[in-house]
Amino acid sequence: MKPEELLSADWIARLNRLTLSTGQRVRGTRQGRRRSRELGASLEFADYREYSPGDDVRRFDWSVYGRTGRKVVRQYLDEQELQVTLYLDVSQSMAFADDGEPSKLLHAARLAASIGYMTLAAYDRLGVYRVDERIGDGMPLLRGRPATHRLLEFLAASEAGGRGDLAEAFKDRSRLPKLPGMTWIFSDCWTERGEEELEEAVARLQAARQEVVLVQVLTRGEIQPRLSGDLKLIDAELGTFKEAALTGRLIEAYEQEFTAYRGRLAEFCARRGVAYVLAPVDVPLRETVLGTMRELGLVR
């Protein structure tokens, strides 16, 4: 893929009016534009407290003193950066694409680029990694709009290949975020052990004090198959295959099992406090970001 395929100029203009919304106020290491739990030096008023000798006299509120005789100082909310980490699934199954549609990997990269751009535009810190059965080398933490081209080049250089195992990958603590923050996983969520494998990965991220968002990227053909006849079905990652006669009854059984799997996935995400987003490849990027993600309170 090419960097220019990930974000168009008009989409960037729309993203400039959006920001990520996190359930936690996070204190970082550098001044940013996001409120933390701490009181500090921003311009947003928080509260009053009684004046004590040694307080900054510039914060002394003379109007309150004149009206009530109380000696108080103004306190302001501290604004700190949020650390956002993106993990892009690059296992072989992400190369799959329906006719006339982008691959799952390209669609996932476009979503990751959108979230990454919002992070950089807010002057928050951004980490980006590729993941299959391990977490590959990522980029040094990025910050600010000028880093957008580095983000796009990194994502555009992603190629699908190999076997995926998110539970195994997230065992590597050195590749987990060092500070509390927000972590996004972009994956088709096709795993050997189903939701159990994903739950293990999520548990490790939450132990690293992360607010986790799981974005499941699938083709329409995976959600609602339109195949028929005698076919050989090949596992893209394991190379195993199974011959099957795809009848209407078998397709119906698949759709029922897929619905049940999605239900289990959504249930475990709700139980663990994880935001779950289904992002089909044939649904426009704008609809997923401005619709689904906004409705879930992930962007505003």
Image (cartoon, helix red, strand yellow):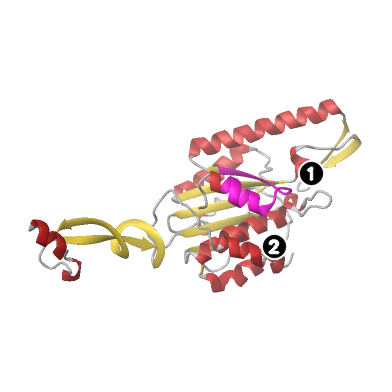
- Which mark is in front, 2 or 1? 2
In percent of width and height, residue 223 lies at 74, 39
Residue placed at 47% from the left, 60% from the top? 83
Horizontal relation, residue 205 to residue 59: left or right: right
Compare residues 194 and 228 and report the one nearer the observer.
228
Residue 235 bears which disc, if any?
Answer: 1
Horizontal relation, residue 53 to residue 204: left or right: left
Q: Is residue 290 magenta?
A: yes
**Dot 1 amino acid type:** Asp
To which residue does mark 2 refer?
158
In the rendered image, the residue lying farthest to the top is 249
In the rendered image, the residue lying farthest to the front is 67
In the rendered image, the residue lying farthest to the left is 69
In percent of width and height, residue 253 lies at 77, 27
Compare residues 230 and 156 and report the one nearer the observer.
156
**Dot 2 amino acid type:** Ser
Q: What stretch is highlighted in magenta?
A: 276-293
Q: Does the magenta stretch include residue 268?
A: no
Q: Do the residues labelled 2 and 1 touch (CB within 8 Å)?
A: no
Cα separation, mark 2 vs mark 1, equals: 21 Å
Element type at marker 1? loop
Q: Which of marks 1 and 2 precedes in the sequence?
A: 2
